[in-house]
């Protein structure tokens, strides 16, 4: 979807979103929605950051009227519906660009999903031997945006493991982005797709991911708390595999 292509105004998500832009700018509504959605996915599992993130949620939702507050769960449901209908897409990234919310001055453009699919088919090759040897494979994107590259890579692994192994137990997805909102968009989509992994918010050049990092700037997906991945972390004695 190009920068100038607006989403059809009759789409359920767009209609709901527009109801919230009567008092607030589209960018503020989008940012608030993404942050609250990410917190709602994180807090049932990541108790270490529960209080801080819950306070952020309450501060944000308090800006909106009771009727406006009811719209946010509906928006969240529309994202779930979209990814259930078609898991192989960057739904939030497409909307983000269609609403013209990207920082064009800083060159913020998301790679189209079909390009990411092509890159995944080229780079993700014959993963089964590595998984049989190491237990799992890791896919990382140090400038992940909303997660299109990671989603495409995950699906390529899934295809290769189909009928052999449960991909959710054998692929770890990690990403980093300097932009807080877009990094959480990636976190939301990976979480809803049932991916084990984590997203770090920060500059990957000056503060890249490190296994000895504190968890301060990390968002861990719900699947990363499953028994399989929890056991692997316990064996290694580290939060980040």
Image (cartoon, grey):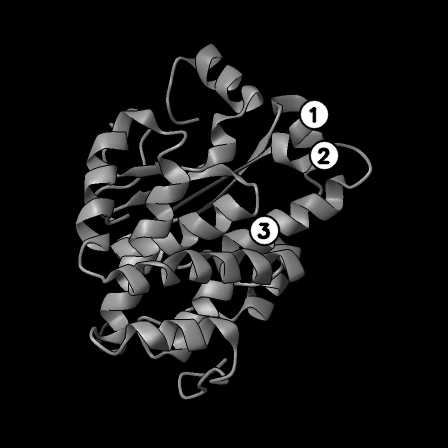
> Marks 1/3: CA distance?
19 Å
The disc label shown at residue 23, or none: none
- Is label 2 in contact with label 3 (beta carbons under 8 Å)? no
Residue that numbered label 1 is attached to: 132
**In the image, residue 195 lies at what x, y percent?**
54, 41
48 sits to left or right of 149: left
Q: Earlier in the sequence, mark 2 or mark 3?
A: 2
> Marks 2/3: CA distance?
14 Å
Q: Give the residue drawn at x 64%, y 51%.
A: 155
Whether residue 113 can be seen here: yes
**In the image, residue 137 lies at what x, y percent?**
58, 34
| Residue density around tag 3, few if under 14, some if 14–19, many if 20 or more, within 10 Å | many
170 sits to left or right of 240: right
**In the image, residue 90 lies at what x, y percent?**
52, 63
Residue that numbered label 2 is attached to: 128
90 relative to 99, above or below = above
In front: 21, or 105? 21
- Is label 2 in contact with label 1 (beta carbons under 8 Å)? yes
Whether residue 119 can be seen here: no
Q: Give the residue drawn at x 40%, y 88%.
A: 4
236 relative to 161, above or below = above
In front: 45, or 127? 45
Numbered disc 3: secondary structure: helix
Which part of the image, by quadrant, shows the C terminus? top left
Numbered disc 2: secondary structure: helix
Camera-nearest label, 1 or 3: 3
| Residue density around tag 2, few if under 14, some if 14–19, many if 20 or more, within 10 Å | some
Camera-nearest label, 2 or 3: 3
- Is label 1 in contact with label 3 (beta carbons under 8 Å)? no
The disc label shown at residue 153, or none: 3
């Amino acid at each position: 979807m190009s920068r100038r292509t607006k989403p059809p105004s009759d789409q359920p998500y767009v209609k709901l979103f527009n109801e919230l832009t009567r008092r607030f700018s589209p960018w503020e509504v989008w940012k608030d929605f993404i942050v609250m959605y990410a917190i709602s996915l994180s807090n049932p599992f990541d108790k270490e950051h529960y209080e801080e993130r819950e306070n952020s949620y309450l501060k944000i939702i308090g800006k909106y009227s009771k009727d406006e507050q009811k719209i946010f769960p509906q928006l969240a449901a529309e994202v779930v519906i979209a990814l259930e209908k078609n898991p192989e897409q960057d739904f939030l990234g497409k909307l983000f660009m269609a609403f013209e919310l990207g920082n064009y001055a800083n060159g913020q453009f998301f790679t189209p999903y079909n390009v990411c699919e092509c890159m995944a088919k080229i780079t993700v090759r014959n993963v089964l031997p590595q998984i049989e040897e190491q237990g799992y494979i890791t896919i990382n994107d140090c400038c992940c945006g909303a997660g299109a590259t990671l989603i495409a890579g995950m699906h390529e692994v899934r295809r290769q493991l189909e009928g052999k192994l449960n991909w959710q137990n054998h692929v770890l997805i990690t990403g980093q982005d300097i932009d807080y909102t877009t990094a959480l968009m990636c976190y939301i989509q990976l979480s809803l797709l049932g991916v084990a992994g984590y997203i770090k918010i920060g500059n990957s050049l000056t503060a890249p991911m490190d296994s000895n990092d504190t968890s301060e700037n990390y968002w861990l997906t719900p699947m990363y708390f499953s028994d399989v991945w929890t056991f692997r972390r316990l064996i290694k004695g580290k939060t980040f595999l």
